[in-house]
Image (cartoon, helix red, strand yellow):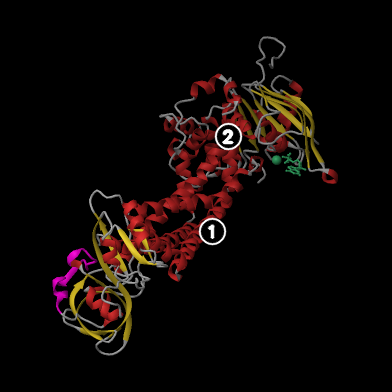
Amino acid sequence: MQGSASIAGGADAAAAGPRRRLRMAPKLAYRNLFHDKISLFVTLIGIVFSVVLLSFQSGIYLGIERTIAAVLDKTKGELWVLPIGTKSVDDPSLLPGREKYTVLSVPGVANVETLSMGFARWRKQNGGATTVLVVGSDWNSGGLKPWNVIDGSVDQLAAPKMVAVDRTYFKDLDVKGLGDPAEINGMTVKVGAVTNKIRSFTTMPYIFTTLGRAQIMLGAQQEQGSYALVSLKPDSDVDIVQERIQAKLPDAEVLKREDFRNRSINYWLFHTAAGSGLIAGTALAIIVGIVIVAQTLYASTKDHLNEFATLRALGASAGYIIQVILLQALFSAIVGYALGMTLTLGIFKLAENTTLNVVMTPGLAALLFATTIGMCMLAAISAIFKVIRIDPAGVFSR
Amino acid sequence: MIQSKSDGAKPSPILVADGIVKVFGTGAGEVQVLKGVHLDLLPGELTLLMGPSGSGKTTLLSILGCILRQTEGDLVIANTKTNKLSAEAMADLRRNHVGFVFQSYNLFPTLTALENVMLALDVRGRMPADAPQRAKNALDSVGLSHRINTYPAKLSGGEKQRVAIARALAGSPSVMLADEPTAALDSENGQSVMQLMSDVSKDASRAVLCVTHDHRILKYADRIIRIEDGVISTDERPKDDPVARANMERLSAEGAH
Ligand SMILES: Nc1ncnc2c1ncn2[C@@H]1O[C@H](COP(=O)(O)OP(=O)(O)O)[C@@H](O)[C@H]1O
Ligand SMILES: [Mg+2]
């Protein structure tokens, strides 16, 4: 480091072997950490709390993102025509009508499907009602067709009155399976297909049916839908076609599928109560984690201050001492994360068959791990400030 | 360069302190603890530093060990003048040249005896593959080869101090500084620790300075320095000087009571 070391006496130069700095520092950090069980326990509680809370927030976010993506990506529409002012895919209103034929006349367009979406009242068979999101399209020509069908079939939906419901919402809808009746906006329906885990990102279940039936339920005209889904001819340029359609439909908005997906996700995240709750929850989780870890790490550092002063007297560099503190933070992060993630995965497993749509992926797990480590490193700052101000002269004054 | 006038036999000092002044506090609360201390330490000698409580022994030791800065005066250790060194450079100097032994041992309670010694090697940036062996050898040389895996809490005071000496030795320091290393020990352990300090000082590349109140251990001294009210009052080598020797033996005998 500094020049003075080079003026070392002969014995020193000869004794200096290969430098392998990181051998005792981790041991000391590890021992100090596990020495005080209560403080370790508090630290771990803090980290586990943060990890679980963060996992939930981000797991919900990912669930939402996937649901939105699922709805959009199940369609063939590269371009979406939407009513002006549409904020999100599940904020449907109605287009003026007849967009399908206008768009079909645009060069480069291969096919157009009308998708009808809207909120409706689901009257349960044994009384009571709930709001649902009706989705109607002509899936024979590439519209939004229900997926993950586990009972009945999509073809059965062509028969009169038939709708598809998701098993996750059986209780909410008061049905038990195929053939169970209900009423949507006064129209009698029957369960003709059951899907699995098509969870909406609002509290309202999706109900799939044909375009015609949905239009009647939602009070739309025959050629009127919420969205027009445009698929393009193989060699056409999506930007050019988008411009052409937009020019022909001044009273609607034309978006690429991924743009509409991002708009929907952003709307949910930044403009709904659920989204704000999620952001606040994430911030809270991180703050709580940092505060608890900072507190316990600082306390532990104070407990071991004499040792750090001794280390300094023995000639440890400031870097070496900071290393010990950071390693303590790192070990806490690793242990806390392992516990927190185990707990999270357990809870997510339990949530699998509920309407709570939480998703964990290896990528998210890695991101959370990095966040946990970052949190603990940040928490180490106050402890580091404490140790680097240690006066080694303190070693004698006891 | 520090070179004594060549009378042949006398080795050159490892540490030279010249006109050391230490002032604590400022303004009305200002206290001058050291008032111009001149001192050099020769290799191969055990020097005892004695003096009444509050006379500035610990302060002087801290300055000589580069853990406290003097207000005035020069300090040279192993040919390095310390006055203008940064805190990190001072740490380097301690790491490379100074070994400490404390009254309260200052061992790391969460590490075993062996690990305590290895930590000092690691801090010194000397973790060669044979570090465990070196640490074992150091513990062996203080007679603790049977206690290497014991934690400090399970060691007696004398054993702890011997681990601390092994820790200081493992880095082969050119200056070893001890502040009342036997104060917390019973007579028997105190004697054995002092014997050890004396053996350690016989290395021709090392000087040992030991602060003590303990008259029982005067017989180990090659040199005795007395400090009173911040200045050195006497500095003698009893083994060369019949009067001083008689004096020391009298004190030693008194201390035994
Ligand atoms: N950090 C400090 N601040 C102020 N005064 C100090 C400090 N350290 C020591 N002193 C004072 O310096 C004097 C000498 O202390 P010290 O060197 O510990 O003496 P000794 O070790 O000989 O008993 C005492 O009066 C003590 O109160
Ligand atoms: Mg003292």
- Per the image, the residue denoted by label 2 is A315
Label 1 lies in ligand 1 vicinity (Cβ under 8 Å)? no
Left or right for A347, reference B51? left
Label 2 lies in ligand 1 vicinity (Cβ under 8 Å)? no
- Tell me the subunit letter for badge 2: A
Task: Please provide the residue range marked out in magenta.
Answer: A140-159
* Residue A189 x/y as whole percent: 21, 83
Left or right for A362, reference B211? left
First of labels 1, 2 by sequence position: 1
Instruction: Determine which quarter of the picture holds residue A66.
Output: bottom left
Q: Give the amino acid at mark 1.
A: Val
The vertical placement of B135 against A9, above or below, is below
Between A78 and B24, the residue placed more toward the observer is A78
Between A182 and A297, the residue placed more toward the observer is A182
The vertical placement of A134 against B154, above or below, is below
State whether residue A343 appears in this view. no
Toward the right, the furthest residue is B28
Q: Give the amino acid at mark 2.
A: Gly
Instruction: Determine whether the residue tagged by mark 1 lies in a helix, strand or loop.
Output: helix
The vertical placement of B27 against B97, above or below, is below
Quarter containing the N terminus of chain A = top right
* Residue A163 x/y as whole percent: 21, 77
Toward the bottom, the furthest residue is A127
- Per the image, the residue denoted by label 1 is A291
- Quadrant position of ligand 1: top right
Closer to viewer: mark 1 or mark 2: 1
Between B92 and A227, the residue placed more toward the observer is A227
- Tell me the subunit letter for badge 1: A
> Could you classify mark 1 by the number of other residues whose Cα lies within 10 Å: few (under 14), some (14-19), or many (20 or more)?
some
Residue shown at the point (25%, 58%) measured from the top left: A231
Instruction: Determine which quarter of the picture holds residue A166.
Output: bottom left
Label 1, label 2: how far apart the Cα atoms are:
32 Å
